[in-house]
Image (cartoon, rainbow, N blue to C red):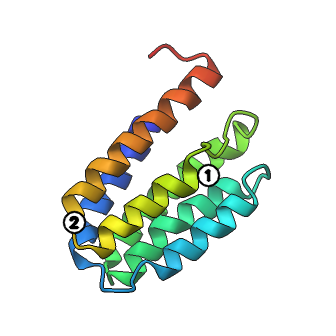
Amino acid sequence: MFAMRRVVMLEVIRLVAPRIPKGGTSGARAAMARAWQVRDQPEYPREDYEVLRRLCEAAQFTPGLWMLNRVATLWLDAADALRFAIRAPDDYVASLTRFFDLLEAGDGEAATVHMAAYLERHDAKLSAALGFAP
């Protein structure tokens, strides 16, 4: 489940990154702030998912929204069931802020690489919390 979500998210990021206009991360930054505010509450996964949705909207990339909406149903259902293990990483704000800065600078490749590393770290911690083998 984690790998599928990560693959879809990274593909959406790769496709959206070159299309983000200057100032286009403002909605995603606001979603990140909301997610951080509710990081210890059941709403966190939904708010966190909103970050990427806002980037798709800023890039006017409807196929990305379709892909996210399809995966979101599965992920959010799983996140609800696994609520005890889903936590915002300590570096959530710093990592996403760096990601947004890279997008704003027009460096989509570096933004994608940065998020790949972030998602791999996050998924590894989640897998460990759930007792899954690496």
Asked if residue 26 is positioned above or below residue 70 in the image, the reply reads below
Q: Looking at the rendering, which quadrant does residue 129 occupy?
A: top right
Mark 2 — residue?
Answer: 107
Q: Is residue 34 left or right of residue 115?
A: right
Name the residue at 39% across, 60% down. 99
Q: Looking at the rendering, which quadrant does residue 64 occupy?
A: bottom left
Amino acid carrying label 2: it is: Asp
Local packing at callout 2 (Cα closer than 10 Å; few below 14, some 14-19, many 20+) is some
Precedes in sequence: disc 1 or disc 2: 1
**Extreme-top residue of the structure:** 133
Mark 1 — residue?
Answer: 76
Q: Which secondary structure lies at badge 1?
A: helix
Asked if residue 54 is positioned above or below residue 5 in the image, the reply reads below
Q: Is residue 52 visible?
A: yes
Q: Is residue 109 left or right of residue 93?
A: left
**Residue 131 x/y as whole percent:** 61, 16
* Quadrant for the C terminus in the image: top left
**Residue 119 x/y as whole percent:** 43, 42
Kindly report the distance in space between the C-alpha atoms of the residues bearing marks 1 and 2: 30 Å
Q: Which secondary structure lies at badge 2?
A: loop
Q: Is residue 93 left or right of residue 23?
A: right
Local packing at callout 1 (Cα closer than 10 Å; few below 14, some 14-19, many 20+) is some
**Residue 49 x/y as whole percent:** 54, 60
